[in-house]
Image (cartoon, rainbow, N blue to C red):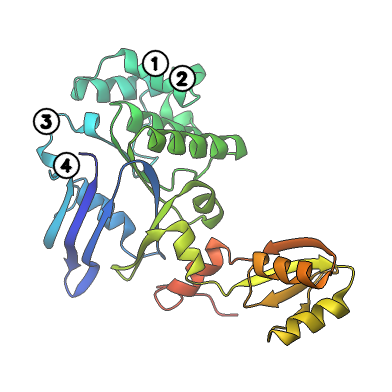
Amino acid sequence: MNSIEIRELTKAYGTHRAVDGLTFDVLPGRVTGFLGPNGAGKSTTMRLLLGLDRATSGTATIGGQRFTDFPDPLHRVGALLDAQAAHGGRTARDHLRFLAAADRIPMRRVGEVLEQAGIASVAGRRVKTFSLGMRQRLGIAAALLGDPGVLLLDEPTNGLDPEGIIWIRELMRGLAAEGRTVLVSSHLMSETSALADHLVVLGNGRLLADTSMEEFIDARSTPRVRLRTSDPVRLRAALARDGFELVTAEDGRWTVEGMQADQVGSLAAREGVPVLELADDRASLEQAYLDLTADHAQFTATR
């Protein structure tokens, strides 16, 4: 009921296709990270889903329905696309009251989401006096106002301090755990890595990946183990017999390419070699993402 369904979605501006034949689903119960270089089509896809732009072809639906067909859209979908959208002359409370009245949302929800977003103490201030981080919190409060089953958030941590980043991370994961559908677009790989369970990656308007976080990283990682041992000579000899090489790393550590930690651990135990530290050394999300999107970035700096 709350799933997002994108089917052969295309948006063309003249000869340029901002979105080019996209097909993917965003499912409830998990946080889906929406990634891609600038100009990849992420914001356009979100705008098409919310009916803010009209698709050239294809469909973007929520539970099989278009957003514009919902009689009570804020009860179904909460979105933060632009933290600057709130009228600067209104107070935060009045901004939310206006939205609540427009969608027949009980006024008690205004106070609840102000508290939830941590801005109840400044609810009487005009939005134009807010910092970017406070505007982000207000935008998230607005997205939560109708207690929706679907959340679409574009760069939700922009302008937030460390406490705010931890708050939004816990909030999104909590909403997903309740069975809601959460789609979060971000350029911050560290935050996406800490937040998302699943990834949808675009490049030049096309789908590059639709997979779990773990599978995405593993597919772009060469197995490697990082370790410390007090007897590298014997371990090197044992590894060489199986066709592997012990290579010097930094801080007195060693690495072995092409093996996993449990394999090295078993070999060391069999040979009686003491191992002081042992861990799989996987690529980071950032490394895997850059590897996938290197040929799809619209803007790149020279070195």
Q: Secondary structure at mark 3?
A: loop
Q: Are marks 4 and 2 in contact (CB under 8 Å)?
A: no
Three-letter amino acid code of the residue under disc 2:
Glu
Reading the image, the residue beneath label 4 is: 67
- Residue depicted at x 47% and y 18%: 120
- Classify mark 4: residues with Cα within 10 Å, few (<14), some (14-19) or many (20+): many
Q: Residues within 10 Å of mark 2 (few under 14, many from 20)?
A: some
* Viewport quadrant of the C terminus: bottom right
Please state which amino acid type lies under the numbered disc 4: Phe
The answer to whether residue 143 is above or below residue 231 is above
Q: Position of residue 172 (x, y in %)?
A: 44, 38
Q: Tag 2, which secondary structure?
A: helix
Q: Which mark is residue 115?
A: 2
Image marks 4 and 3: residues in contact by CB distance under 8 Å? no
Label 1 residue SS? helix
Question: Marks 1/3: CA distance?
Answer: 24 Å
Spatial distance from mark 2 to mark 3, Cα to Cα?
Answer: 27 Å
Tell me if I can see residue 114 in this picture. Answer: yes
Which comes before the other along the chain, label 4 or label 1? 4
How far from the left and from the top, in percent, is residue 156? Answer: 44, 43
Earlier sequence position, callout 4 versus callout 2: 4
Which residue is the site of mark 3? Answer: 71
Q: CA distance from mark 4 to mark 2?
A: 28 Å
The amino acid sitting under disc 3 is Pro
